[in-house]
Image (cartoon, rainbow, N blue to C red):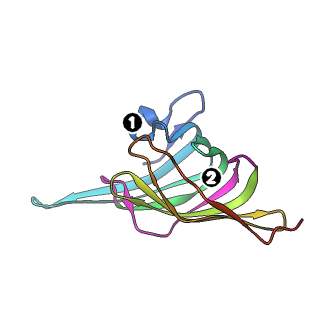
Amino acid sequence: MPGIRFAATGFQPDNLTPLTEGVIALVDGSVQGQGRIDWNGTKVTSTGDFSTDGTALAAAFGPIAGLKGTIHFTDLLGLETAPGQTLSLGSVNPGILVENGTLHYQLLPGQLVKIERGEWPFMGGTLVLRETILNLGKPSAKRLTFEVDALNA
């Protein structure tokens, strides 16, 4: 796939799939990659790799800018990945702006996202997003726990 371009006031991911409704919006950036689906008559397998470089979007926990990374699907049709997927975030604002972060995650069966860890430099220390599992398949409370390590006051 040479690329799909999303514009905040134009084509959006929910034009492709309803799975993104209530999860992300106002996406401004592009995604490119490839997928493969194999069928041998009894079994279907699928894999894929998709990348973005500098995308902005609105997420349930705040606006994100400078989203960069590649996701490797171990089951493209089921939207599942192996552990240890990584995204870099130029900035995110869950109530206070943090910049230059890294998020480690895994997509699980049933539209679950396992946040393995997130980290951002913060006031001379580190802001850490602790491990959690988010259910994106149904409306539910999303609980995120942040901790501050070595704050320089």
Left or right: 135, with 92 as reference point: left
Taking the image as drawn, is residue 17 in sight? no
The residue under label 2 is which amino acid type? Leu
Q: Which residue ends up furthest to the right in the rendered image?
A: 153
For label 1, the residue is 18
- On the image, numbered disc 2 is attached to which residue? 67
Q: Residue at x 70, y 47 (%)?
A: 93
Whether residue 84 appears in magenta in the rendering, the answer is yes
* 121 vs 128, nearest the viewer: 128
Q: Residues within 10 Å of mark 2 (few under 14, many from 20)?
A: many
Picture residue at 46% right of the left edge, 47% below the top: 2
Query: Which residues are drawn in magenta?
Result: 75-96
Report the side of 117 relative to 20 (left or right): right
Q: Position of residue 78 (x, y in %)?
A: 31, 54
Earlier in the chain: of badge 2 and badge 1, it is 1
Q: Are marks 2 and 1 in contact (CB under 8 Å)?
A: no
Q: Amino acid at mark 1?
A: Pro
x then y, percent, for residue 10: 55, 28
